[in-house]
Each structure stands twice: as structure tokens, then as C-alpha cells.
């Protein structure tokens, strides 16, 4: 899905000058009627193709995707949560090289972890400076070269990193390896997501029948393999909340609800009442609600009965190919192609747009 969202809008104004009076009239016309976003300079942009979001305390970090025509290529944008101001741009070119770009980011305590294709960069949450760079080696996959880290998560003081066929657990305090998990029984196959569920770690695999591997967080042992019964290559996002786990099935298009206690399928939530719905890009669950992104909208569901609470797709929210989401406190952040919308969880109203 990142590839499908990698085409940015190009905004240009073309004024054909025939004589001085026409030029003046044209200038006046564009000043009066041009949309505000057309007047904005790309040099003033603070985001480009966000690939992931992290929030902790008063800070919000956004991993910017690959856009070699942008000065934000291969960087992390940090904002102040309370007033929306830009704190800093953290450039990663000197660390990872210009050919890579951050595709996952998490924050916990005093540190932020950023994953690109073959390394995990630990940053100071206070200063944005690099604490350490941890290189990860992975077995090459037929569809991807070189090694590819697909997900990163911080759970109980440990950093969990998934590449194409291995999950590595690191000590968050010093970056040392606690264990490397790659047993055949774990069924790791191009993991796309890592989430916490109670005392367990769930890994969403995007190949091999889209299985979910459940591990014991304390020792990395296998608890079970969950089977959402979805099409191959269809799953892109997963979220856990309370007694349930939710998996987004893009080609369904449905959300599969699994029991966190047994791993069995509870139900498949459909979107037949939502006009224009083609498939969920990402999903996040919290406090009895489920938020799903789709093309140019965010859909809120009631997890008790699966009913649609509201569909958000107003132009003011600036949704265009919305993807990564995160819930923190009373707010929901939704990333689109070149912006980040902050929404009020209670009513879906727009708080602010980061650009």
C-alpha cells in the first residue's frame, strides 16, 4: 500500500501572459479564488508521504517516506503535541544512506526507535540526537532486496524487530540482543505488524496464509498460530484491544475479529453500508471503538456490534490516501500523503492539521 500512496499531488499555477492588463487580471483572480493549499510552498512543508507515527508525552514523531525530490526524504519530523508547532527535522541520510527511508517508528520513555530497511536507529526523545544504530541482517526474499525490516514495537522494556523471516528482541536500555526468533514453528513470513496483547506479542505475517504468530513476551516462546482465514497478501494492519484482536483484510474488504484468549475467529466485520469503500488500509482499536482508513476516509465502528458510528471524509481533514494511525489519550492521529490530521476521539471533529 505504501507504493500505491507514493505518488504525490503536484500543484502548479500556470498564467498565460498575453498583455500587461491580462497579467494583472490573472494575478488578481488567483489571489482572490485560489485555494489556500495552492499558495503554500513545498519549502514550507514539514511532512512527506508519512509511513508511521509515534506519540509520547508532548512529542509527536512522523517517519517521512521516500520522495527523492523532497528535502524531507529520509527524515523524521518532530512536532509539539499541544500546539502543533514543528520542533525539529531529524535527517537520517548520514546514518542510513540516501537509498533508504524510515518505514516504522515507536516511542517509549526517553527514546525513539526508527526502523528503515536494514537498521534500527535509536534517538534521544529530548534532543533528537542519535543514541545508537543497530544493524539487522535478514535472509533475502524473492520480492525484496536487500534486507527488509517490516515492523518494530516496544513492549515491556524490550524492542521487537521483524524482518522478512526473523523476529529479534532487543534490550531497550542498551540495544543488546536478548534473543533471535526464527523457528519454523513460528511461521514468520514477511511480518507487517507487531502489537502487544496482554502478556503476549502478536506478529502479523503477510505471506503463508496471513497467519498471526502469538508469542510469550517474557521468553519468546510460541503460544499459538492464529488463522484469520484471509486471502494471501491481503493483510496490512492489525490492532489489539482488551479481549480482541482486529486484522484489516484489504482484499476482503473486511476486518477480522479474533479472540485474544483462544485465537479463534469471532466474526468478519463488513462495510457494505459505506459507499465507495474498497478496502481497509489500516486499523486501530481503543476503548470500544475501531477506526479504519480507506482511500479518502476514516470509518469509526462500534466494536460491540460492528455498526458504523461515523464516516469522516471532509476536505477540512485533508484525507488523501490515509494510512498510518495512532490513538493517544483523547486524540486520533491519521497520516495522509503529505499531512497529518489530529481528531477528537469523542466526536471525530478536527483538532488541527500538521503539514
Image (tube, rainbow, N blue to C red):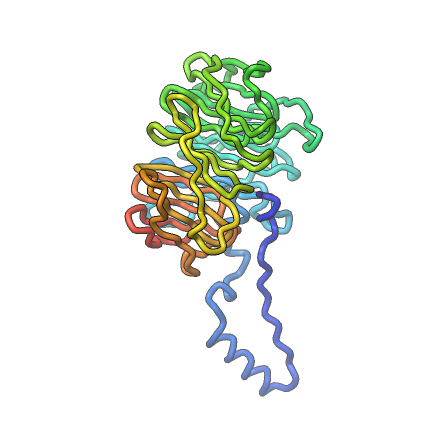
- Residue 302 sits above or below residue 228 on the image: below
Which residue is pictured at 43% across the width and 25% down the height? 264
| Above-or-below relation of 9 to 255 | below
Residue at 66% across / 22% down in the picture? 139
Q: Is residue 284 left or right of residue 330?
A: right
Look at the image and tell me whether residue 104 can be seen.
yes
Between 127 and 206, the residue placed more toward the observer is: 206
Above or below 76: residue 134 = above
Locate residue 70 relative to residue 46 in the image: left or right.
Answer: right
Which image quarter holds the N terminus?
A: top right
x and y percent of residue 39 in the render? 50, 66
Question: Where in the figure is residue 112, as x and y percent of width and height?
Answer: 45, 31
Q: Which residue is at the front of the view, 231 or 216?
A: 231
Q: Which image quadrant is residue 136 in?
A: top right
- Do we see residue 130 in this rendering? no
Looking at the image, the residue that sits furthest to the right is 142
Q: Nearer the viewer, residue 18 or 210?
A: 210
Which residue occupies 38% across, 49% down? 342
Residue 97, percent across and down? 64, 35
Count of numbered labels shown in the rendering = 0
**Observer-nearest of 219 and 293:** 293
Residue 297 position, x and y percent, is 45, 52
Amino acid at each position: 500500500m505504501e507504493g500505491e500512496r507514493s505518488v504525490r499531488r503536484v500543484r502548479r499555477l500556470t498564467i498565460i501572459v498575453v498583455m500587461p492588463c491580462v497579467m494583472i487580471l490573472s494575478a488578481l483572480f488567483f489571489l482572490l479564488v485560489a485555494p489556500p493549499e495552492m499558495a503554500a510552498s513545498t519549502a514550507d512543508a514539514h511532512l512527506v508521504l508519512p509511513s508511521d507515527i509515534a506519540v509520547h508525552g508532548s512529542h509527536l514523531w512522523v517517519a517521512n517516506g521516500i520522495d527523492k525530490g523532497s528535502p524531507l526524504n529520509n527524515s523524521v519530523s518532530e512536532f509539539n503535541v499541544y500546539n502543533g508547532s514543528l520542533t525539529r527535522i531529524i535527517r537520517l541520510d548520514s546514518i542510513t544512506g540516501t537509498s533508504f527511508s524510515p518505514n516504522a517508528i515507536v516511542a517509549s520513555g526517553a527514546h525513539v526507535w526508527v526502523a528503515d530497511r536494514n537498521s534500527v536507529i535509536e534517538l534521544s526523545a529530548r534532543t533528537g540526537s542519535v543514541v545508537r544504530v543497530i544493524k539487522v541482517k535478514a535472509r533475502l526474499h524473492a520480492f525484496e532486496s536487500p534486507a527488509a525490516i517490516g515492523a518494530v514495537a516496544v513492549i515491556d522494556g524490550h524492542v521487537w524487530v521483524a524482518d522478512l523471516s526473523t523476529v529479534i528482541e532487543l534490550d531497550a536500555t542498551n540495544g543488546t540482543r536478548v534473543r533471535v526468533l526464527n523457528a519454523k514453528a513460528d511461521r514468520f513470513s514477511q511480518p507487517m505488524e507487531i502489537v502487544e496483547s496482554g502478556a503476549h506479542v502478536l506478529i502479523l505475517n503477510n505471506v503463508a496464509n496471513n497467519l498471526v504468530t502469538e508469542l510469550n513476551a517474557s521468553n519468546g516462546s510460541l503460544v499459538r498460530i492464529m488463522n484469520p482465514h484471509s486471502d494471501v497478501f491481503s493483510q496490512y494492519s492489525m490492532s489489539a484491544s482488551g479481549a480482541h484482536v482486529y486484522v484489516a483484510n484489504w482484499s476482503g474488504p473486511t476486518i477480522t475479529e479474533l479472540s485474544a484468549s483462544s485465537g479463534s475467529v469471532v466474526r468478519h466485520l463488513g462495510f457494505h453500508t459505506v459507499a465507495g469503500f474498497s478496502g481497509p488500509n489500516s486499523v486501530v482499536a481503543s476503548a470500544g471503538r475501531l477506526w479504519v482508513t480507506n482511500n479518502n476516509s476514516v470509518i469509526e465502528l462500534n466494536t460491540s456490534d460492528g455498526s458504523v458510528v461515523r464516516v469522516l471524509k471532509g476536505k477540512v481533514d485533508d484525507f488523501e490516501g490515509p494510512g498510518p494511525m495512532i490513538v493517544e489519550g483523547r486524540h486520533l492521529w491519521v497520516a495522509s500523503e503529505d499531512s497529518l490530521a489530529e481528531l477528537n476521539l469523542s466526536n471525530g471533529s478536527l483538532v488541527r492539521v500538521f503539514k
